Amino acid sequence: MSFFIIKTREKTRTENGNEFLYNKKSDKLPNILNFFSKKIVQNEELRNAEPGLYTWILRESGNIFASKTLTKQEIGTLHINLDILTNKKDNSTIYAAGELKIIQKNTEPNTIIFNLLSGSYMVKKFKNLSNKNILILRNNIVKKFQDILESFFIPSQFLECSAIICSEEEKIGGMKLIEISNIRTPRTNLNVLNTMFNRKGGTRKISRNRFKKFNSFNKQKTLRKYIH
């Protein structure tokens, strides 16, 4: 494992509105792998996992691996990173991948809502199929994932997206979760990440008015997504 992937098209935003990009410190790769490996939850662990947004992969073996998203760039939780971090434990082919949200209500068990959005793994799975066969395959994948979650007594729902505002990708893979979220990385997490990554391009403070507009836009966008 001589590499670690970082998404560069997104910027990580902090609690106070700063934004910046990251590059890994090459000499810190073992620390990076160790840090994010410990944050991965597997199979029945999802039942009691911390509420929030996660990326997940399902391997052909039936094992589910997921990791909570710490930053908008999904540093350490990209699907390719989950593949790298779990390959020694289970090197079977990745069957499906996507995003999920764990919802916790009082003393009830966790509920999971999920999609099948992953540019690294799902796009090529549906490539060159007819619309009919795409939906058949999509529904089979959804059922398999839900059946596995049900075996762990975890209720789940696929976030189907058929509205006019949905992209073609969403109409197949479901509504976006991470992209439409307003993730703010807490200072405690930033302090840890700064020991393993170099900031690239410095920081930029967002003005108060722009910060409010950004939050308002994301809230409206999220509401539109969830109104059927």
Image (spheres, helix red, strand yellow):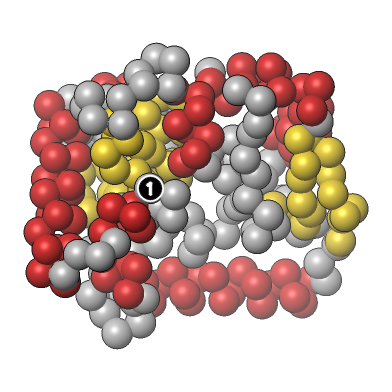
Which residue bears the numbered disc 1?
121
Q: Note whether 36 is above or below 102 in the view shown.
A: above
Q: Is residue 188 left or right of residue 84?
A: right
Q: Amino acid at mark 1?
A: Tyr
Q: Is residue 133 left or right of residue 192?
A: left
Residue located 44% across and 49% down the image = 120
Q: Is residue 46 visible?
A: no
Q: Which sits in the foreground, 86 or 39?
A: 86
- Work out whether residue 186 or residue 3 is closer to the camera in this orientation and state it: 3
Q: Quadrant of residue 76?
A: top right
**Is label 1 in a helix, a strand or a loop?**
loop
* Rendering coords of residue 194 (x, y %): 80, 34
Q: Compared with residue 45, is residue 150 higher up or lower down, i.e. above or below?
A: below
User: Residue 11 appears in which quarter of the rendering?
Assistant: bottom right
- The picture places residue 5, in percent across and down from the top left corner, at 62, 40
Count of numbered labels shown in the rendering: 1
Quadrant in which the C terminus is drawn: bottom left
Which residue sits furthest bottom? 164
Q: Nearer the viewer, residue 205 or 11?
A: 11
Q: Residue at x 33, y 68 (%)?
A: 170
Q: Position of residue 197 (x, y in %)?
A: 78, 35
